[in-house]
Image: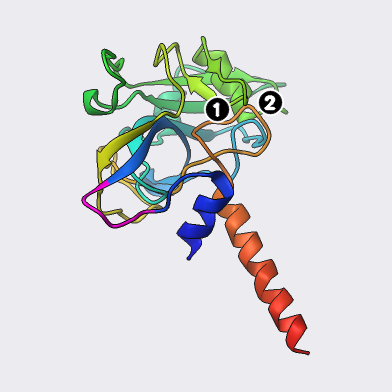
Amino acid sequence: MAAACLAVLVGVPAASGTAHAAGYRYWSFWEGGAGGSWTYATQGPATIRPADGAVHGYRFAVSADSQDADRPRSAPDFAAICAGTPAREGTKRVALVLDFGTPADAPPGGTPPARRTACARVAPDATGAEALAAVAAPLRYNSQALLCALAGYPEEGCGEQVDTPATTPAPATTATPEAASGQAKGNDGNAPALGLYAGAAAVVALGAAALVRARRHGRR
């Protein structure tokens, strides 16, 4: 039911269970956690304001439904990524993992760059989007202010629909450094956004809770 609600809210098809399902080629946005885990961000990078020591991950891939977005394949290791960027008063450091995906996920004629990491030094109140812009320009957005390209990749396209084999989703809260699977697509609701639709899952949860409260109230 939640997947169906998500599809209605963001305009993408819910998983159908068929051998092939409609997918979308896009950048997804992740937050690093303890133990080398990745968790799909519940808000977009334009609204999140990470603390010094945060790790953000971005993964370009094709996702068949709201449950199979691929995680970055490198571990969220702040100490290693920002080892050469010492702390400095009046700034904060945000580690970034940029995973451009596999040839299978690339648009026709495209070749994904090698995945890399970067350490952004930004102002204390900077957003995740500002940290990304500091280390991964050029960024490309569409007319709805969705982020279409990171570090110039891909050169064309933006969240286009493609045909992709359906996959079996894995748990979305943890991953080994080389694991690939994931959670719902993302959009922060306030441009610019990473992925197609971050925070939509949170909208679904809030909407479902409101519906339950309304039904309970109606019974009284």
Mark nearer the viewer, 1 or 2: 2
Give amino acid for label 1: Val
Q: Which secondary structure type mostly characterizes the magenta part of the structure?
A: loop
Viewer-side residue, 56 vs 194: 194
Using the rendered image of the protein, determine whether residue 86 is visible from the camera's viewpoint: no
Viewer-side residue, 7 vs 121: 7
Identify the residue at horizontal 28%, vertical 57% (top origin): 17
Q: In the rendered image, which residue does mark 1 sit on?
A: 94
Please state if 178 lies on the left or on the right of 207 as rendered: left
Q: In the rendered image, which residue does mark 2 sit on?
A: 126
For residue 218: magenta? no
- What stretch of residues is rendered in magenta? 15-20
Residue contact between numbered discs 1 and 2, judged by CB atoms under 8 Å: yes
Q: Position of residue 8 (x, y in %)?
A: 54, 52
Residue 22 vertical placement versus 151 (above, below): below
For residue 17: magenta? yes
Identify the residue at horizontal 50%, vertical 35% (top origin): 196
Crowding near the residue tagged with mark 2, few <14, some 14–19, many ≥20 C-alpha atoms within 10 Å = some
Which label is found at residue 73? none
Give amino acid for label 2: Ala
Crowding near the residue tagged with mark 1, few <14, some 14–19, many ≥20 C-alpha atoms within 10 Å = many
Q: Position of residue 54 (x, y in %)?
A: 54, 35
